[in-house]
Image: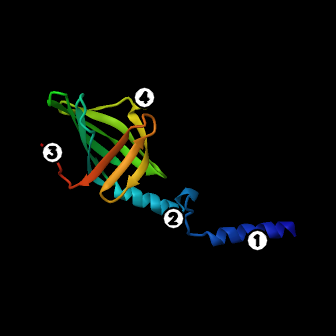
Amino acid sequence: MRRIIYLLAITLAMAGGAGIAPEPAYAEKNARFQDQEERRNMLLGTWFGETPPTAGGRIQWIVDRKRDGTYSTQFRIYAPDGRYRNHMETGIWGVSGPVYFSATQGWRQGDQVVGTDTAKARFYDAYEIQTLKSKLFEYRHYVTGNNYRVRKVRNGFTFPK
């Protein structure tokens, strides 16, 4: 009798799942994943931020986040005398729960993009999402505690004069 029940259970399991590919447990669609997807979609596109002017200068940045999880950030770093230099970084980004994160994979050096040593922790950043609206994103770096605020701008946006 036990053998019959066992064979019946196997037959039903095989017949019930025939032709259906199992979906990984983590791929379950629920409200939490939908919220996460909405937050991620809100961060797509071009955003502009700047630090307040100080006696030591200021920094402006333009970040462009793509749907494929890549980003590029252009920095303009101002010296106290008003002169500036430009710097560009590339990498990957994402959102998980209340965390926005990025991993720098390279930066521009002359006409080339030079890769980072991804074994070094300093190229990975995690931020607490504080405010995320369609045109405003405020976030805090978990390690430094620095707060940042960026606003969404049109594609092709360039640094203000």
C-alpha gap between disc 4 and disc 1: 55 Å
* 2 or 1: mark nearer the eye: 2
Residue 8 marker: 1
C-alpha gap between disc 3 and disc 4: 33 Å
Going by the image, does 97 lie left or right of 108?
right
C-alpha gap between disc 2 and disc 3: 40 Å
Labelled pair 3, 4 in contact (Cβ < 8 Å): no
Residue 128 image point, x, y percent: 44, 46
Labelled pair 4, 2 in contact (Cβ < 8 Å): no
Whether residue 123 is visible here, answered yes or no, is yes
Q: Dot 1: within a 10 Å radius of its alpha carbon, few (fewer than 14), some, or many (20 or more) residues? A: few
**Secondary structure found at label 2:** helix
Task: Please report the residue visible at 44 percent of the width from the left and 31 percent of the height from the top.
Answer: 121
Residue 140: quadrant of the picture = top left
Give the residue type at disc 2.
Ala
Q: Which residue is mark 3?
A: 160
Q: Dot 4: within a 10 Å radius of its alpha carbon, few (fewer than 14), some, or many (20 or more) residues? A: few
Most extreme residue toward the right is 1
In the image, residue 24 sits, relative to residue 99, either above or below, namely below
Going by the image, does 126 lie left or right of 4?
left
Q: Earlier in the sequence, mark 2 or mark 1?
A: 1
Residue 31 marker: 2
Task: Please report the residue visible at 58 percent of the width from the left and 58 percent of the height from the top.
Answer: 25
Labelled pair 4, 1 in contact (Cβ < 8 Å): no
Give the residue type at disc 1.
Leu
C-alpha gap between disc 4 and disc 2: 35 Å
Labelled pair 1, 3 in contact (Cβ < 8 Å): no
**Secondary structure found at label 1:** helix
C-alpha gap between disc 2 and disc 1: 37 Å
Give the residue type at disc 3.
Pro
